[in-house]
Structures are given as C-alpha cells and as structure tokens.
Amino acid sequence: MELTSGVNWIAVIVGAVVAFLIGWLWYSPKLFGTKWAEGVGLDLTTITGVQAPAMITQVVGIFLLSWVVGITAAANSLLLCILIIVTIAVLIIANGYFAQKSAYARNTEAGYIIVMGIVMIAAQGIF
C-alpha cells in the first residue's frame, strides 16, 4: 500500500489541527498545565514566549500521527490504529518513568496521546 493511496487529507488536516488546539488547552493552566509543569520540573511563570523547536516538533508529530490514522482508515485497519496509539501512550509513560516525572505528568502526557487519537479517528469518520 502506498502511504498516500486513499488517504482522506481533509480528515488528516482537520484531525491534526483539532488535536493541536486541544493540546494547547490540555497543557494550559485552565486544565492540566500547572500540575503537569510541577510534575516535570517546570515553572510556567518563567517560560517566556513560544518555544519554537518544541512547537515545530509537536506540529510535525501531530501531523504524522494524523497521517498514520488516515492510512489505517484507508486500509480499514481501525484495530491497528488503536494499537499504534496505545503503544505511543505506553512509550510516553515509560519515558516519563525514566525522566522521573510525576505520575500526574505521565498520565497527563499519555492521556493527551489517547485524546489525540480519538480526535483523529473521529475526524476520519466525520470527513
């Protein structure tokens, strides 16, 4: 299978944009940001401006995951898609243990991956 064959690019882009916007809210002080920052050793009040490398990498990663979801949707492989998303979430948790992040921070990060996946799968179903 080609990586672009049958992919619904509108759904890929919408899923990526919505997932990014949810992430912006997810890590804001309005939701989980403050306690997450404590769990990873950051002080949100000392972070100035947008950190370009982190944001660029996040946008690329979100787009790639949305593309993977699009490929699995085109191949009617929903279970593979779910397996990929759960695998990423488990690896995020493992990385959090290595980095000695708090349980709250690990769960916040893994939870965001799961929510992103749900949004991206939903976008494939809607568009």
Image (spheres, helix red, strand yellow):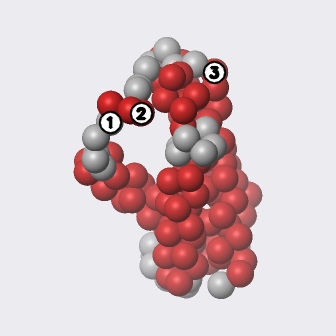
Front disc: 3 or 2? 2
Tell me the kind of residue under disc 1: Ile
Whether residue 71 appears in this view of the structure is no
Which quadrant of the structure image shows residue 120? bottom right
Q: Secondary structure at mark 3?
A: helix
Q: What is the three-letter code of the residue carrying label 2? A: Leu
- Return the mark for residue 67: none
Q: Quadrant of residue 41?
A: top left
Residue assigned mark 3: 103
User: Quick one: label 2, few (<14), some, or many (20+) residues within 10 Å?
Assistant: some
Taking the spot 64% from the left edge, 26% from the top edge, the residue there is: 104
Q: Position of residue 57 (x, y in %)?
A: 33, 51
- Residue depicted at 41% across the width and 33% down the height: 44
Q: Using a 10 Å C-alpha cutoff, classify the residue at mark 3 as few (fewer than 14 neighbours), some (14 to 19) or many (20 or more).
A: some
For label 2, the SS is helix
- Residue pointed to by mark 2: 44
Chain-order first, disc 3 or disc 2:
2
Q: Disc number at residue 47?
A: 1
Q: Residues at badges 1 and 2 in contact (C-beta under 8 Å)?
A: yes
Label whose residue precedes the other's in the sequence (3 or 1): 1
* Residue nearest the observer in this picture, 40 or 95: 40
Badge 1, how many Cα within 10 Å: few under 14, some, many 20+? Answer: few
Tell me the amino acid under the disc marked 3: Ala
x and y, in percent, of residue 113 in the image: 59, 47
